[in-house]
Amino acid sequence: MNDDFSDLEAELKRMRPCAPSSELQSRLAATLDRPAAPTAQPVRIDHSVIFRRAWRWVLWPAAAAAAVALALVVMHRPDSVRSSAGQAAHPVSGTAAEPLATTTAAADLYEPVSAENVLYDSRDEGLITLEDGTAAHRVFQCYLDTYTWRNPRTNASLRWTVPRDELRVIPVRAY
Amino acid sequence: MEDTPDHASWSKWFERYGPRLLLCARQWTCSLADAEDVVQEAFVRFWKHQRGLGGEPLPLLLTSVRRAACDRARGASRRTAREEQVAGDELEGGALFEPLRAGDDRRAEIEIALRCLPVEQREVLVLKIWGELTFEEISRQLDIPANTAASRYRYALAGLRKELTAPVP
């Protein structure tokens, strides 16, 4: 533009800005190298997700109770088979109802006693822009959830541990 | 451009544009850490949502960087007095440029001279030289007339020359 400054401009253009830190590159890799699952579009707060997550708290105990019932059925089956061994013609007919009734009664005795969440990994994935244009932090957290049920009559307990990933979108507030 | 996540492709991009984006971000943020956060936010947004838009990527990336920096500055201005005090230390946090082969003294001189420039002149200079924007693009970026951008650029070069040729006390 101005010939008087051409030498200075040329000198400035030869200077190379410092590269970003390796930490920034790692953060980018953590965000961009992950499979496309989280977001290919602006983040949308989906209230149905919250609803589904709330349902998990109902479904997991129900699933665990079903597992207990199934385990008790399996435990009682040899007896029924043994007892029906003598009745060669119709081995199941006379005995099937009884173990099932016992199972249901036993399963009912298991009561939830604890639910623990252990956070073992948390990554701040930086700022994102929500659909309405506001900024939010995206935080990826990994939990280990442990649920325990106990049968107060026999003192038998059932413990179920499952890993759980959680993606939190936390609005950035301007004070 | 492929849509699948590809470390090689984004890292190649970032290797090329990252240093320039960071230098520009440092004109608008109060610390190197803030500048890196701003660059991360802008680059991720660009890579995920804007890279298919076509055209020159650098002006778009710089717009994104500036917007993120302004958002951050608005937030910072409402925070505590201590943080505001930190925000006053412009361009803190290490060297702006890689060392020169010929010697590091010249780089240091230029950096000192750059830091002495008024902010509005320095940002135009940085956008023109390292952001490779035209005066039209700079005027849109900073919301100033193109002539103002051009004159700030000239003032910045004159100021730099004056600082660089000033006798050492």
Image (tube, grey):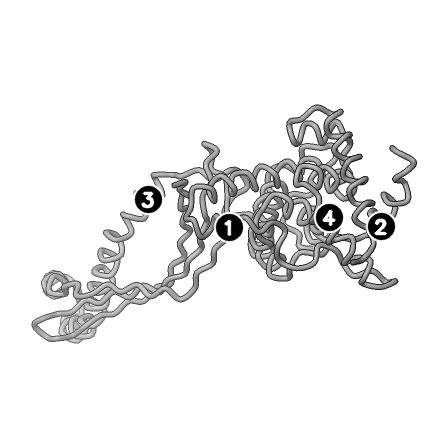
Q: Position of residue A109 (x, y in %)?
A: 10, 65
Real-space Cα distance between discs 2 and 1?
43 Å
Which element carries disc 4, helix, strand or loop? helix
Question: Taking A83 as reference, is A105 above or below it?
Answer: above
Which of A63 and A81 lies nearest the eye of the viewer?
A63
Residue B165 tag number? 2
Could you tell me which chain the residue with mark 4 belongs to?
A: B
Q: Residues within 10 Å of mark 4 (few under 14, many from 20)?
A: many
Which of B124 and A116 lies nearest the eye of the viewer?
B124
Q: Quadrant of the N terminus of chain B?
A: top right
On screen, residue B51 versus residue B73, left or right, reads: right
Question: Taking B137 as reference, is A22 above or below it?
Answer: below
Residue A89 visible to an observer of this rendering: no
Q: Which residue is mark 1?
A: A126
Residue A50 tag number? 3
| Quarter assignment of residue B141 | top right
Real-space Cα distance between discs 1 and 3?
22 Å
| CB atoms of marks 4 and 2 within 8 Å | no
Which element carries disc 2, helix, strand or loop? helix
Q: Residues within 10 Å of mark 1 (few under 14, many from 20)?
A: some
Real-space Cα distance between discs 1 and 4?
30 Å
Q: Nearer the viewer, mark 3 or mark 2?
A: 2
Q: Which residue is mark 4?
A: B114
| CB atoms of marks 1 and 3 within 8 Å | no
The residue under label 1 is which amino acid type?
Answer: Gly
Q: Residues within 10 Å of mark 3 (few under 14, many from 20)?
A: few
Residue located 72% across and 47% down the image: B20
Q: Nearer the viewer, mark 1 or mark 3?
A: 1
| CB atoms of marks 3 and 2 within 8 Å | no
Could you tell me which chain the residue with mark 1 belongs to?
A: A
